[in-house]
Image (cartoon, rainbow, N blue to C red):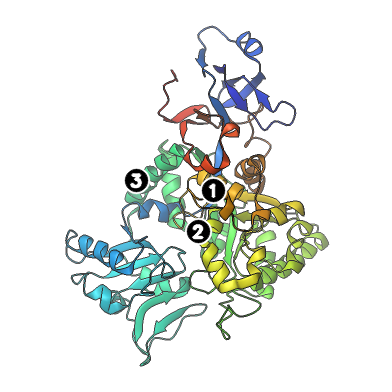
Amino acid sequence: MLSLYNGHITTLDPHNAEVTALAIEDGRITAIGSDEQLLSLVKPNSKTVNLHGKTVWPGLTDAHLHLSLLAQSLDMVDCDTSTREACLRRVAERARTVKSDTWIIGHGWDQNKWPEGFGNTELLDSVSNGHPVFLTSKSLHSAWVNSAALKVAQIDTRTPDPANGRIQRDENGRPTGILFEMSAMKLVRDRIPKPDAAALAGMIERAQSLLCSLGLTGVHDFDDAACYAALQGLESQGRLKFRVVKGILIDSLQDTIAAGLHTGSGSAMLRIGPLKLFADGALGPRTAAMLAPYENETTNTGLLTLTTDEVFATGVQAVQNSISLAIHAIGDRANRVVLDGYQRLREYEAQQHLPHLRHRIEHVQLLHPDDVSRLAALDLIASMQPIHATSDREMAEQYWGSRAKLAYAWRSLLDCGTILTFGSDAPVESPNPFWGMHAAMTRVRQCESLEKSWQPQQCLTLQEALHAYTIGATYSASSETWLGRLSPGYAADLIVLSNDPSSIDKRDFYIIKPEATMVAGFWVWNTSDLQL
């Protein structure tokens, strides 16, 4: 038995929201209350920890990230630069140090930030020293490659655009080196040697340490089957230290069904999540599907990659096998198509007396006014990433104009009764949940004045933001009866903070760092001066 006392403990227990002590045994909270109450229950040879007034929160969950990509990005060229030239210099530095015939992989560029705009193959060729190069954009919805990469992938003037993707070409029809959307990027990505299971597991273990240090005790991952296999290996070896809800990609759906797996299958540490589908692209490359054209682009309405009929047809197959859906939708048209599909699916579930599954829309970045209330009406979860609002605001205003009033509309959705769950989309953005909470509460960038708050009517309170990283996340994974609170019977997943977040000015909220992180009663991260 372990007892923590003399603390400021936020439990999120509706009957006992603030306590000073709690007891843990066999990975579960056994009691909460005052110091006197808890210390009277201490058994011989049990351990007690004096928190010395430090704050304890329930562990946080990032409800949308890409664990394998994040893990691999830790060793990639950092392309998040203010100029294209700076990115090219970093590629050149890597080209001087890697072995021959080795791919140069990078992530994070954003042509919207670069005065020079998009790059091309010739620029990469000039710095890559013959190495094939594959650089993903910050949005993960486009890639910049060089001639060597195009040659390996056999992409030339005769190569047609793949379904739901586009190969950018010059006036003579030659590929420029910019690939839009997953299907086009896949033409090159599939030719890149992949790390073996052991190597990928090691990378994920490194990322796990980073995530635990940020106060995350769980994540919802949307990477491929190789990531799942690596996670299974880590769990079997006792090396998986935090909880993972593993989303299913469409190319793994049949194998998942054949194996008898469904949403919720698995262990307390590694469980199957929803089926991930894509309804459109992203704002950065202007491939998000729009009801009306982008500002000053009279013919561009983005790329719709899923129809209402496809949402329904795939949804029927999924729900018949007890698999919930999580559908990526950025633009207002994509969100409407997904909502229309979900409406038909809800009617089907009721007619067939099937379970009312907890379906999600991922991102929900722009809604038409007529559609704001529909998520709550259809009992859909809005899985959103607050830091996108502060990162994307200039693009949203430039490309969406007045429509951006309902961009990243957390308050509007919450006021309609929508359940929110928050994440980061890492490595698109930092997985630091305190950065996400700061964005949700202020809608300004770090170090900016609150006077610069973008659409401040959409801001949330600290309690609402915390709820989305805890109870909202566990609800979306149907684990809210044993995760997300510090209540008797709940898992002992918690974080220790040196300061009480409720006493910190929300402008400075992003500086908060956990001192220790516990999962299932074990300390998985600790820099505290406490005798843990």
Is any part of residue 267 visible from this angle? no
Q: Are marks 1 and 3 in contact (CB under 8 Å)?
A: no
Residue under label 1, please give it.
Answer: 436
Is any part of residue 152 visible from this angle? yes
Q: Which residue is drawn at 54% across and 20% down?
A: 53
Residue under label 3, please give it.
Answer: 202
Q: Which of marks 2 and 1 is in front?
A: 2
Q: Earlier in the sequence, mark 3 or mark 2?
A: 3
How many C-alpha atoms fall within 10 Å of the one at disc 2: few (<14), some, or many (≥20)?
some
Using the numbered discs, state the Cα–Cα distance from disc 3 to disc 2 in whole angstroms.
30 Å
Q: Is residue 87 above or below residue 172?
A: above
Pick the front one: 273 or 353:
273
Pick the front one: 440 or 372:
440
Pick the front one: 63 or 294:
294
Q: Earlier in the sequence, mark 1 or mark 3?
A: 3
Residue kind at label 1, given as amino acid type: Gly
Residue under label 2, please give it.
Answer: 391
